[in-house]
Image (cartoon, helix red, strand yellow):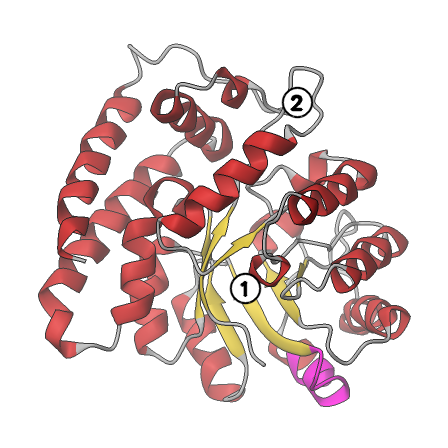
Amino acid sequence: MKISGTFCAALTPLNKDFSINHEVYFEHCKRMLLHGSDGIAIFGSTGEANLLSLDSKMEAMQSLVDRGFNPSKLLPGTGMSSMNESIKLSNLAVKLQMAGALILPSYYYNNPADQGVIDYYTNIIESVNDEKFKILLYHIPQISGVPIKQNIIEALVKKYPDNIVGIKDSSNDLENMINTIKNFPDFCVFSGSDSLALPVMQGGGAGAITATANISVKLLSFIVKFAKNSDRSQELKKAHILQDSIRKIVFSQEQISFMKAIMRINTKDSIWENIMPPLVSLNDFNNNNNIKKIQELLIEMNDLSTNF
């Protein structure tokens, strides 16, 4: 079975001691499903994954399932700089019967040989050793410094067709995504950008996995679901423009602290003020023009979504 649809790249609620608040995490993930997300991508870039310990992520994955969250709706980010830690996290995802895993290439050492990237994924797949283990590669070269090139995809798909089923492309490069769709017809290409979700879906994409979905998943899920429906073209156009406007504001500053501030305002839960250093919490809401703009756009979203 392939992976498709809208996935919210979930924020991670933290306690003051920087441990994960499991109760709020469960409720947030559940709320995203209720608002239209087909699944939840936990421990991606937006989830502060690379600032959290392996143990804390494993504990949170287990907690979500123990609290009753459907594991088939969870897509954990298991790619870490340490290959062995990636294997441990991936093994847990398989044990808990999650939808698969979104795997970032090993990072920090920039410009590795293509074969080195292939070897990294090969060792994870061989160690997990389960043909049911579905992997989405994670292409975000502007952050990781390690691109997932077309020849890397080709080599991995040829070697592990049952495991390597798709990619999340967060490069903001529409041409690259469309080329991937054309070059690998059975491959699941996910847009990592809300702004590109519509053209990617219309070009044959499988879905979208985005950060902004934490506050605008209603819009994104509508775009992904009805992208090719000509009868909804006017609504799609409005949703696309509004989603693009929301994303641009979110990404005009450090987006995780900004979205946590929005969550804190909307849920009235102070837990969202906590963020892992070196990120810094936003507190001066009254003098933040972007906060005001987002609140206005979210009201517009709620009005528009009544037609969905």
According to the picture, the residue beneath numbered tag 2 turns out to be 277
Residue 160 in magenta? yes
181 sits left or right of 137 in the view: left
Please tell me whether mark 1 sits on a helix, a strand or a loop.
strand
Question: Quick one: label 2, few (<14), some, or many (20+) residues within 10 Å?
Answer: few
Residue 258 percent coordinates (x, y): 43, 28
Against 114, residue 103 (above or below) is above
Residue 113 percent coordinates (x, y): 79, 68
Query: Residue at the spot x=64%, y=20% of the render?
Result: 15
11 sits left or right of 193 in the view: right
The residue segment tinted magenta is 153-163
75 sits left or right of 156 in the view: left
Most prominent secondary structure in the magenta stretch? helix
The one of 271 and 213 positioned closer to us in this rendering: 271
The one of 305 and 50 positioned closer to us in this rendering: 305
According to the picture, the residue beneath numbered tag 1 turns out to be 168
The one of 49 and 71 positioned closer to us in this rendering: 71
Residue 254 percent coordinates (x, y): 47, 31
Residue 268 percent coordinates (x, y): 39, 19
User: The residue under label 1 is which amino acid type?
Assistant: Lys
In which quadrant of the rendered image does the C terminus lie?
bottom left
Q: Quadrant of residue 57?
A: top right
